[in-house]
Amino acid sequence: MDEKTLIAKRVALELRPGNLVNLGIGLPTMVAAHLPTGVNVFFQSENGIVGMAPVPEPGAENEDLSDAGGSPIGAVPGAASFDSAMSFGLIRGGHLDVTVLGGLQIDEEGRLANWMVPGKMVPGMGGAMDLVSGAKRVIVAMQHSAKGTPKIVKRCELPLTSVRRVDLIVTELAVIEPTDKGLVLREVAPGVTVADVLAQTGAELIVPSAVPTMPVGA
Amino acid sequence: MSKVRKLEEAVAMIPDGAVLMIGGFMGVGTPPHLIDELLRQGKRDLTVIANDTARPTVGIGRLVTAKAVRKVIASHIGTNSETQRQMIAGETMVDLVPQGTLAERVRAGGFGLGGVLTPTGVGTVVEEGKQRIELDGTVYLLETALKADFALIAAKRADYLGNLEYALTARNFNPLMAMAAETVIVEAEDIVPVGVIPPDSVVTPNVLVDCLVAKERRHG
């Protein structure tokens, strides 16, 4: 299993039946394909739909129905569409159970930076700041390091997305839970040791006496 | 009096330097012929308030590529390398606003509010220059209302009076913007007789619409 699939599978285990879930672009989008059997959730796309689904078959695209990246999608029975104020009311108003986002950096206080690299990449925050501020649960799905440089750091150098502490970090090496005492190592990936995780993390991790392996099968 | 105007007449109302709100999300729900006509008439120095600038060859991105835009107020320009280039080169001003905040600032503009209080952006660069207000232990930013001279709206169906119906995710910012501009110009995919759109299905009531762009003749 490749690293991104592992991350997507592990994140999918966090979703509960009936959850309203928003998946960010890139890696988080993969979570939809790995829902455990019997877990039905509604996916929101912030451009204005609850109940997004893949395009049912090639040729069935509708030019008025797309995801937040502008790509064609489908909709499940029971889907609902609405304007952007309603869409962000769902996000900010405490109606969104889970958001899964990518990350550039996360610090010891569990604060996420994921929207710009000054001087290099200025895409704009899109919906990320509202999602992190407003979702009931924020899960960051990202690779543990970028070209050998740890992404989990003492203090974010990149501009923050929100000062809100995220709820869970899932990487190809570990599951880490930010708490008021610091970052707690909750699980390691199959074949990965606690020492491996510590070596590739730029922040202090609290390591409980027992750290189980991620419950993800091949 | 009929609100139906020829495309070129509708767009001719828009002067250089106007502030435009343009509906759409990555081009979906952006009025295509209105963009074509803005380009054909060579409009300049526009301020565009929109969710994003799509791609360099798509929707609002085409206005940026043609250097018709002086200032962009948007939540996302990551899919348009030309907008990013013009911003970094100092050719175009870009004001980046969190998407939910942008929606609420437009809504406030149309709903007669001075602004809104939102927790989004507190403690980030978005807070710079803004007033922080604490209510019942939660910190909010005061975000001011946005208004425009013209709103360019894409609708699925309009009736002759200008009642509008939207489709799926092409709705996005359109109904909000139709409230927040001095003059509202609508490009509808179909124009139908009054009564065809049931009152419960009307999202933008006709009183908000100033001008409906005529369809090209398809009958003999």
Image (spheres, grey):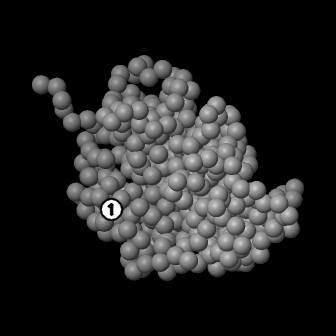
Drawn side of residue A65 relative to residue A104, left or right? left
Q: Nearer the viewer, residue A184 or B170?
A: A184
* Chain under callout 1: B
Mark 1 — residue?
A: B56
Residue A205 x %, y %: 77, 71
Residue B195 shown left or right of residue A198 in the figure: left
Q: Nearer the viewer, residue A193 or A95?
A: A193
Position of residue B15 relative to residue B127, above or below, is: above
Pinpoint residue A181: horizontal percent, then vertical percent. 86, 68
- The reply to whether residue A192 is in sight is yes
Camera-nearest residue between A99 and A169: A169
- Give the percent coordinates (x, y) of residue B154: 39, 42
Amino acid type at mark 1: Pro
Task: Provide residue B207's location: percent of width, then percent of height.
Answer: 49, 35
Which residue is at 69% across, 54% downward? A214
Residue nearest the viewer, comparing A209 with A157? A209
